[in-house]
Image: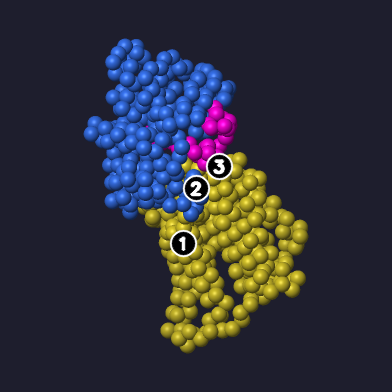
Chain colours: A yellow, B blue
């Protein structure tokens, strides 16, 4: 019973973490049609910002907010300096963001060295849930992920800011003709996606090894979630992450981590074969 | 209100407009007539800032707007209903209208009642997705969206396209009232001569990218030789 409960909690945790990482990627890829290969490195920068601030004695919570804002600002710079010149040049966006990814990663190696850094979690308590002991900080991570999903949906589907952003994405020329400042919305949408990556990095930092490769491990399942779920709607990747994350952690728990990878990729291949546009459909450019 | 002098523009190396001149006064309604491919839509797109002028200038009010971005031109008071309407099909009627109001007047803007007075059907369909409306309703939505920003001047491209005759008349009357009652300045590109004569006081004929003739609608109703000469009818 305990074993099953822990497996369920771990699976939920993993699903929510993937969603947290994928959300920023989805906004940038699904809505702006830019494959941001540097998303994992924005995640990395969020984690290292927290490392740096904690070493300087800044409290965790301030570090968390600072990491989110700083990485959002870096996203703004990325958009202004690079991305805006290559919208609609699909292959070029992959190459350019890959370049940025390498530059950030090597920059981090130069500054911090290739080794792992550590951060401390602000919450160290263990909670008793139906007799099983579970770290409270992991529950905090799950809550943050849920908040991010809810907040993003609210922002894009319930506010006027989101309405204008969706109009720019749906028909940029017409939105401009109505007076919507299209460039401002490009910048803000991209920066929002980047800020979410920074937030995810800072939230995850205390429970993982903070090293220059840490972005990659989450980037692949995040991309898989988008492919499986479909990028036409924000709900697609949430569904995709649910399937990928649950399959991965349940298989890993009951069988082995290696078999989990095999099963996840096999499932992704089958899902993409049956639903080329993703489960939520409308995945391709319209 | 709108002054265009020696406008040259086109796509790539081609020149669709070759030295086009036009002047539209405040509160005036003019129609632009001409065969297909003569540069009517290109003219509207150039005024709206969607394509760049190669030569010449465009003034709106006291400001030069050639070279400005569409959003700046829209904020200055020009609205545009493109050919094919280009409503947002996945957004509701209300959201479409809100975008027209917000784009011009900021995120807090509301849809003015004037829009619903002009097109009452839109009020009944507020929560329906734009793409599910009939062609005539979509045209009303596109015009309503433009009016929601309370523009001083409206560019209307082929409003009758694909609509049944009764709806064409309805749209024509609505536009006529908008000009007479609210003092809207209107430039309409139209193939349907009857609609053009209803909406506009003055008709301009465009041929191969230049203005070749103009006449009042009253004159054209009495003597249709210009219509025969410049349109294939």
Q: Judge the density around disc 2: few (<14), some (14-19), many (≥20) Cα neighbours within 10 Å.
A: some
Label 3 lies in what chain?
A
Residue A51 place in picture, x, y as percent: 70, 68
Secondary structure beneath dot 2 equals helix
The numbered mark, 3 or 1, whose residue comes first in the sequence reads 3
Task: Give the CA separation, mark 2 to mark 3.
Answer: 28 Å
Task: Give the CA separation, mark 3 to mark 1.
Answer: 26 Å
Residue B105 image label = 2
For the C terminus of chain A, the quadrant is: top left
Front-lying residue, A161 or A227: A161
Kindly identify which residue carries mark 1. A154
Secondary structure beneath dot 3 equals loop
Left or right, B8 with respect to B150, comes to right
Residue A87 image label = 3
Question: What's drawn in magenta, residue-wise?
Answer: B58-85
Mark 2 in CB contact with mark 3 (< 8 angstroms): no
Front: mark 2 or 3 = 2
Residue A108 place in picture, x, y as percent: 72, 59
Q: Residue at x 50, y 28 (%)?
A: B2
Label 2 lies in what chain?
B
Left or right, B131 with respect to A237, comes to left
Secondary structure beneath dot 1 equals helix
Front-lying residue, B95 or A279: B95
Q: Would residue A113 be counted in the magenta stretch?
A: no
């Amino acid at each position: 019973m305990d074993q099953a409960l822990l497996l369920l909690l771990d699976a939920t945790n993993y699903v929510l973490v993937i969603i947290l990482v994928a959300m920023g990627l989805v906004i940038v890829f699904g809505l702006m049609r830019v494959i941001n290969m540097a998303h994992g490195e924005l995640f990395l920068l969020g984690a290292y910002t927290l490392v740096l601030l904690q070493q300087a004695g800044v409290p965790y919570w301030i570090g968390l907010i600072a990491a989110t804002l700083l990485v959002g600002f870096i996203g703004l710079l990325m958009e202004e300096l690079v991305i805006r010149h290559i919208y609609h040049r699909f292959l070029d966006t992959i190459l350019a963001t890959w370049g940025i990814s390498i530059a950030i990663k090597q920059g981090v190696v130069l500054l911090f060295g290739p080794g792992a850094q550590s951060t401390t979690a602000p919450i160290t308590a263990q909670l008793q849930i139906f007799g099983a002991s579970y770290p409270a900080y992991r529950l905090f991570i799950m809550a943050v992920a849920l908040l991010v999903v809810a907040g993003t949906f609210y922002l894009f589907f319930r506010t006027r800011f989101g309405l204008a952003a969706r109009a720019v994405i749906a028909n940029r020329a017409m939105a401009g003709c109505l007076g919507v400042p299209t460039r401002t919305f490009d910048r803000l949408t991209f920066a929002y996606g980047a800020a979410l990556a920074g937030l995810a990095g800072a939230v995850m930092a205390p429970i993982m090894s903070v090293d220059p490769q840490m972005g990659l491990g989450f980037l692949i399942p995040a991309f898989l979630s988008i492919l499986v779920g479909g990028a036409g709607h924000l709900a697609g990747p949430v569904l995709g992450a649910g399937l990928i994350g649950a399959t991965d952690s349940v298989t890993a728990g009951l069988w082995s981590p290696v078999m989990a990878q095999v099963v996840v990729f096999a499932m992704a291949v089958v899902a993409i074969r049956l639903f080329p546009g993703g489960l939520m459909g409308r995945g391709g450019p319209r | 209100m709108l002054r265009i002098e020696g406008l040259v523009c086109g796509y790539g190396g081609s020149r669709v407009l070759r030295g086009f001149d036009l002047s539209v006064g405040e509160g005036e309604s003019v129609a632009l007539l001409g065969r297909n491919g003569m540069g009517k839509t290109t003219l509207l797109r150039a005024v709206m800032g969607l394509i760049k002028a190669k030569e010449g200038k465009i003034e709106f009010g006291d400001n030069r707007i050639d070279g400005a971005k569409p959003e700046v031109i829209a904020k200055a008071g020009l609205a545009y209903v493109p050919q094919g309407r280009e409503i947002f099909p996945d957004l509701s009627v209300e959201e479409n209208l809100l975008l027209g109001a917000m784009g011009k007047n900021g995120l807090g803007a509301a849809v003015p009642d004037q829009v619903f007075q002009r097109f009452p059907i839109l009020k009944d369909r507020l929560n329906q997705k734009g793409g599910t409306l009939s062609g005539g309703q979509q045209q009303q939505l596109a015009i309503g969206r433009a009016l929601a920003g309370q523009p001083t001047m409206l560019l209307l491209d082929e409003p009758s396209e694909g609509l049944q005759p009764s709806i064409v008349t309805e749209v024509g009357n609505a536009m006529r009232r908008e000009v007479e009652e609210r003092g809207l300045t209107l430039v309409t590109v139209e193939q349907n001569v009857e609609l053009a004569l209803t909406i506009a006081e003055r008709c301009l004929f465009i041929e191969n990218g230049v203005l070749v003739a103009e006449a009042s609608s009253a004159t054209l109703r009495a003597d249709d030789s210009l219509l025969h000469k410049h349109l294939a009818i």
